[in-house]
Amino acid sequence: MNDLLIILTASFVAISCSLLGCFLVLRKMTMVADAISHAVLPGIVIAFLLSGSRDSMVMLAGAAAFGILTTFLIELFHLKGGLQSDASIGVTFTWLFALGVILISVFAGQVDLDQDCVLYGEIAYVPIDLWITKSGTIMGPRALWISAIVMVIIIAFILLAYKELYLTTFDPAFAAAIGISTTLWHYLLMSMVSLVSVASFESVGAILVVALIVTPPATAYLLTRELKKMLILSVIIGVITSVGGFYLAYALDGSIAGAMATVGGILFGLAFLFSPTDGYISRFRRKTNKAAMINALQE
Amino acid sequence: MKKKILQADNPVTEVHDLTVTYDRKPVLWDIDLTLPKGSVIGVMGPNGAGKSTLIKAMMGLLPLASGYVKMFDEKLDDVREQVSYVPQRGTVDWDFPALVKDVVLMGRYSKIGLFKRPRQSDKEIAMDCLRKVNMEAFAERQISQLSGGQQQRVFLARALAQHADLYFMDEPFVGVDMATEKAIVDLLQEMSAKGKTVVVVHHDLQTARQYFDWIVLLNTRLVASGPTKEVLTDELLAETYGGKLTLLNEVSQEIKNKEFPNREE
Ligand SMILES: Nc1ncnc2c1ncn2[C@@H]1O[C@H](COP(=O)(O)OP(=O)(O)OP(=O)(O)O)[C@@H](O)[C@H]1O
Ligand SMILES: [Mg+2]
């Protein structure tokens, strides 16, 4: 039963990450997700200090605010300061993450958080941390609920705004020309990334969030030539990654998050080698076929 | 400086005192012009003259250092739906996982509205526009599997699908073969006869005379704006393309030959 709870939580997180990740990969902005997933830390700590509780709603709000602040700062340094975008991402998130770490150590007595947990997560503890309502009813694991709610929000967002996201990703100039605000959609997408980062930071941790945002979409990208199919494939790959990772960790008695990232990497490697359209092997075959043809012609 | 700036009787768009700068360096300086409704208009000038910048500025895609633009006598934001745009081809990632028909359908997005899905009629219009640029056989292809000229035609189809009244096209014929170019120009002229206006950035002086009713010559400053016959003169071309005289002599020779043509087509 506990296993099932962990697998479900991980799968919900994987689905949210994979869906958003497709758009980030295509916008060449996965590093922004990396930045956000780290930079929400001070938001979480500040929200915690202000409210004095681990109430998820307050934390979500704090983290979302910092996610948007991160996006804003990256844009500001890049556009107004003329800094390269990768440098501007690096400056922003290391600084914000450091701020979070300092806040945790200064208020160590009051904050029941530690930075290892933020980076690596503790998905094995998901079943223990229960959501108990005021009347005393036990609703089940808190992380499971949060990841499920976030997943529903993300799916609804993408279903509703599919064509706006599609167009602003593919051709921002045309989108702006027909009156679809690229800035607005950029910020909306980044708010969703913040939401996912916070919702999953305790369970899977910042590093696995990034792995789940980048790897399944990158794998799906190698397998298809259509955005809709890429989204669906990416979700399937994300779920396989989390289920496979769980059992790998079980077999090796190792870290669940680490095992999941490993499975994601293996799936990517397989797609890279064997994809019928873009795979290394099919490209190699095409090359040798061509060489054979040329040889045959010459003979 | 030689100039000839004529005003259109029936302007579809007006540009007033427009100046655009990149890093404080002006790339468009004090442009003031009107363009006539129901015509095919050529925007010409050397590389770096600011042609793309002028189009982007008119479409509101760039901040203006000064001046303003009016379309259909209104502010652009109130009439965006009636205005369409074909960007220079290099501006998007052609490896994007999108099918040709999906890209053309994007032309319908402003008509469909926020959060709604494309209707059957939108899909039919998109197919119809693909047919107009002779690309219906490629509807199901991924866009990276097209040649440069075919990609350009997909962009054209997308703009046509918008059913706009005013079109801005930035070098739409780059890499398009002569037969297709001719077919598309015929289509544009047909559209202009129905009262639509098409503004085209174009490089080929030889074809300009047949294609355009009105021509804008640009080189940071506005050199000329007026009916083709009055604007395509040696003097104004020399002013626009300045310096590159050997090339210009050849071009004007070419134009003189066209002036007394033995038209066979
Ligand atoms: N993003 C930018 N930043 C700085 N300068 C720019 C930028 N884009 C264009 N420029 C400069 O502005 C001037 C006008 O550029 P623009 O692209 O409008 O020229 P163009 O007439 O369209 O040229 P082409 O025929 O090569 O397409 C050029 O000198 C160019 O170097
Ligand atoms: Mg240009």
Image (cartoon, coloured by chain):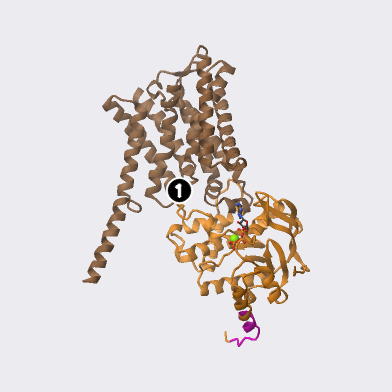
Chain colours: A brown, B orange
Look at the image and tell me whether residue A165 can be seen: yes
Label 1 CB-ligand 1 distance < 8 A: no
Q: Position of residue A112 (x, y in %)?
A: 48, 16
Mark 1 nearby-residue class (10 Å; few <14, some 14–19, many ≥20): some
* Left or right: B68 as drawn, with respect to A193: right
Dot 1 amino acid type: Lys
Residue shown at the point (64%, 76%) measured from the top left: B209
Q: Nearer the viewer, residue A46 or A64?
A: A46
Residue B258 is covered by the magenta coloring = yes
Residue occupied by mark 1: A228
Look at the image and tell me whether residue B142 can be seen: no
The answer to which quarter of the image holds residue A259 is: top left
Residue shown at the point (29%, 55%) measured from the top left: A284
Q: Quadrant of the C terminus of chain A?
A: bottom left
Tell me the SS state at disc 1: helix
Q: Quarter for ligand 2?
A: bottom right
Q: Which residues are magenta?
A: B254-263
Q: Position of residue B240 (x, y in %)?
A: 67, 68
Q: Position of residue A275 (x, y in %)?
A: 33, 50
Residue A224 is covered by the magenta coloring = no
Residue shown at the point (58%, 33%) measured from the top left: A68
Residue at far left of view: A299
Instruction: Check the residue under mark 1 and report the chain it is in.
Output: A
A299 in relation to B220, above or below: below
